[in-house]
């Protein structure tokens, strides 16, 4: 046994020294390349040559870098110099579920599968950087881009984004985690100056990026549009130089968001490596190459030439760019990737099935037995609307998209499925709203007519991917469902008591009709297999196991960001102050005692679970220890299912304000009907620290803590007292 251990240790250390030697060899090659490059060639590598590529060096055979959105699939090809689609016929993809759906699975293994699959498509399509994942924190339900992110909790976003990144990068494709940082609303995104405490920055908004760098080894990071403390985040002295590249040791490439560079000297000196998408200040009519006018192009070259900026600055950028290339397009061993295929659609379907959340289910209204002969009225525009189209840069051209109506029709063949739109929102638009020309009264009348005669109504509504819905470059105008859906639902519920509501959205909505709905399902934007996955859950073929990655407030003011004046949200047009500080999401609801409509971590199942015997190995710990916790869980119902055991910590005595609870661990457990399992957790005591502004560092205070074990942030079943010395 001892010998075997020794052999293993030797093998491991041999492996580690092999990797070090390899890395050293690459760094030497990079030095040699840099020595051969002219100053002009080096500067050229630091900015775009087209909408989605940056140049290589032809003379030396150094390849171009090709990038693509991200994060839910590989976007269709864009023209060289404009935002128009290039019209290729071989660029259709698998549309994977939006990242909110992935976060809702609470299943990091699935996040890895997702990353591998989307990375394979990026590789096949000859992309070197996939622009995702997005890990901006869900601060307000009005943010138009929440659907591209991983919810309100920094721990959840970290745990779910790291395997996604690792999965993508197994293909020799760089993930590009975005948008670094504090781009938590779309309104005024290009100039709003965000101010917040250091504590909120470090405890809430940075951790997912930090995990992606330190644990995910992400190869590129995208800056954001907004400012932080007066400086644009894409070239920020503190955020990039000090924190990202300094404290976290990030050795990859910082890319701008498209058009987020604003100053040559800052871009040069504050850590930006590749500038993309800059507007051309009217220079598009020039005979010269417009890209020469980027901040990191001619103006940068001039400053180096006249001695204002040292040449070592561009050398560092080129070294990082070449390092990314050795990891991607200059790695001769990288795999070839795969096109959209049955295997990828299966991954998309699995993520969708596990991401769907059963919010409410009165008297086991769901599942609907597919054998029953009955009339099912499917009402709502989202039953047929394509949701891979629209939303901004994450828009996809997918091989197929199964609508909810198609999925329901194909699964419930014994039922008489009838459909009415009920309301209409108008065409999917970016940056403007075009109202529908259809007649509201006739749409409503047709819906009520079928609702009256149906045995069951499935209302499939929510938001969509158009401007002021879930879409880039604009925020929602309020928490309520748009396009008259609340009124329509009230009218439907007046004529039919058996209404289940399916919400297709990437954001929380108000639910004035909540008490009258028999069941409520949060169905996100599920991509190519949306309708099939939804029918899987509605029919009971799949038992829902998704959990909310953010809280649903009853009303907008119940959300922390909206509990203050407009300086908190949306800001005064110039500045914005995050007044709720660290109390984002459930941290706000819990600490301020404001009951949410649906809490973070909530999600029902068609079966029931019982948690027993939560126990720790000991009750006293020192800094640096890890807590061994074990929990028994039993599926006490009649069908197989999965439950997410969530472990929160509560600090009982602290010198500073702490949220009532913070998520520190979770585990998704699949159990057959009647089955029990023991689940082990190992929790690092250091994770209980808070960011101490007086020391500008993390501080773990000694004292009494509690582990809160449950199945939602508002469903704590066991409490264990522990002591940290
Ligand atoms: C978005 C980024 C995206 C980029 C390229 C920007 O508008 O904010 O997320 O990757 O465009 O399409």
Image: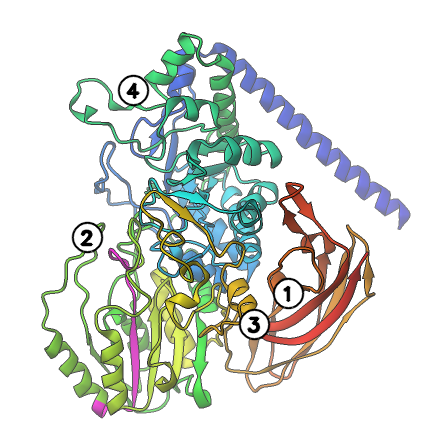
Which residue matches tag 1?
648
The structure residue drawn at horizontal position 40% and vertical position 24%, both measured from the top left corner, is: 46
Q: Quadrant of residue 293?
A: top left
The structure residue drawn at horizontal position 22% and vertical position 39%, both measured from the top left corner, is: 86
Question: Colour mode?
Answer: rainbow
Q: Is residue 31 above or below residue 138?
A: above
The structure residue drawn at horizontal position 43% and vertical position 38%, both measured from the top left corner, is: 223
- In the rendered image, the residue lying farthest to the top is 306
Can the viewer see residue 150? yes
Q: Is residue 647 above or below residue 335?
A: below
Separation of residues labelled 3 and 4 (CA atoms): 53 Å
Which residue matches tag 2?
432
- In the rendered image, the residue lying farthest to the front is 565
Which residue matches tag 3?
712
Residue 54: % across, % down? 36, 27
Mark 1 and mark 4 residues within 8 Å of each other at the beta carbon: no
Between discs 2 and 1, the one toward the N terminus: 2
Q: Nearer the viewer, residue 607 or 126?
A: 607
Which residue matches tag 4?
292
Asked if residue 465 is among those painted magenta in the image, a careful observer would answer: yes
């Amino acid at each position: 046994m001892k010998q075997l251990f020794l052999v293993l240790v030797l093998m491991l250390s041999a492996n580690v020294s092999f990797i070090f030697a390899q890395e050293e060899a690459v760094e030497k090659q990079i030095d040699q390349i840099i020595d051969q490059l002219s100053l002009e060639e080096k500067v050229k590598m630091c900015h775009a040559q087209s909408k989605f590529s940056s140049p290589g060096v032809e003379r030396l055979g150094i390849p171009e870098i090709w990038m693509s959105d991200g994060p839910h699939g590989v976007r269709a090809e864009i023209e060289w110099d404009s935002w128009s689609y290039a019209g290729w016929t071989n660029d259709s993809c698998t549309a994977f579920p939006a990242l909110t759906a992935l976060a809702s699975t609470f299943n990091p293994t699935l996040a890895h599968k997702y990353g591998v699959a989307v990375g394979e498509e990026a590789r096949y399509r000859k992309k070197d950087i996939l622009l995702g994942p997005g890990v901006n924190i869900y601060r307000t339900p009005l943010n138009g881009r929440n659907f591209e992110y991983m919810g309100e909790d920094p721990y959840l976003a970290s745990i779910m984004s790291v395997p996604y990144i690792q999965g993508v990068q197994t293909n020799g494709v760089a993930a590009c985690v975005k948008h670094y940082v504090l781009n938590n609303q779309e309104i005024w995104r290009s100039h709003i100056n965000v101010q917040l405490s250091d504590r909120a920055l470090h405890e809430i908004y940075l951790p997912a990026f930090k995990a992606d760098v330190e644990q995910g080894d992400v190869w590129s990071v995208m800056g954001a549009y907004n400012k932080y403390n007066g400086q644009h985040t894409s070239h920020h002295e503190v955020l990039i130089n000090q924190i990202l590249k300094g404290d976290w040791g990030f050795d990859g490439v910082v890319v701008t968001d498209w058009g987020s560079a604003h100053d040559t000297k800052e871009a040069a000196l504050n850590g930006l490596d590749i500038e993309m998408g800059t507007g051309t200040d009217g220079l598009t009519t020039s005979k010269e190459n417009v890209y020469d006018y980027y901040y990191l192009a001619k103006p940068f070259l001039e400053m180096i030439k006249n001695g204002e900026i040292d040449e070592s600055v561009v050398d560092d950028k080129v070294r990082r760019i070449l390092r990314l290339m050795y990891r991607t397009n200059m790695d001769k061993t990288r795999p070839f990737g795969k096109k959209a295929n049955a295997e990828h659609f299966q991954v998309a379907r699995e993520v969708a099935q596990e991401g769907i959340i059963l919010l409410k289910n009165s008297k086991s209204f769901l599942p609907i037995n597919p054998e029953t002969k009955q009339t099912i009225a499917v009402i709502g525009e989202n039953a047929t609307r394509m949701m891979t189209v629209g939303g901004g840069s994450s828009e996809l051209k997918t091989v197929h998209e199964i609508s909810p109506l198609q999925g329901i029709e194909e699964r419930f063949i014994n039922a008489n499925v009838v459909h009415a739109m009920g309301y209409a929102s108008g065409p999917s638009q970016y940056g403007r709203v075009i109202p529908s020309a259809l007649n509201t009264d006739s749409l409503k009348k047709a819906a009520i007519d079928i609702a009256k005669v149906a045995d069951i109504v499935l209302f499939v509504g929510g938001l969509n991917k158009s401007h002021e819905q879930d879409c880039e470059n604009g925020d929602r105008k309020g928490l309520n469902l748009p396009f008259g859906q609340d009124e329509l639902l009230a009218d439907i519920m007046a004529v039919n008591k058996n209404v289940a509501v399916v919400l297709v959205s990437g954001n929380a909505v108000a639910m004035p009709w909540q008490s009258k709905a028999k069941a409520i399902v949060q169905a996100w934007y599920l991509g190519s297999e949306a309708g099939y996955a939804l029918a899987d859950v509605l029919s009971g073929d799949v038992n829902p196991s998704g959990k909310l990655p953010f809280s649903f407030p009853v009303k907008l003011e119940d959300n922390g960001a909206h509990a203050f004046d407009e300086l908190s949200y949306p800001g005064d047009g110039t500045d914005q102050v995050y007044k709720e500080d660290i109390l984002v999401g459930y941290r706000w609801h819990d600490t301020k005692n404001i009951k949410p409509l649906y809490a973070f971590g909530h999600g029902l199942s068609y079966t029931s679970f019982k948690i027993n015997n939560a126990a720790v190995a000991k009750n006293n710990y020192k800094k640096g220890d890890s807590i061994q916790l074990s929990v028994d869980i039993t599926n006490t119902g009649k069908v197989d299912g999965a439950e997410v055991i969530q472990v929160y910590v509560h600090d009982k005595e602290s010198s500073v304000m702490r949220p009532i609870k913070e998520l520190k661990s979770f585990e998704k457990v699949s159990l057959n009907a009647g089955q029990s399992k023991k689940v082990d957790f190992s929790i690092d005591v250091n994770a209980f620290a808070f960011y101490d502004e007086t020391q500008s560092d993390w501080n773990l205070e000694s004292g009494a803590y509690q582990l809160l074990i449950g199945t939602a942030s508002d469903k704590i079943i066991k409490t264990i007292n522990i002591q940290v010395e």
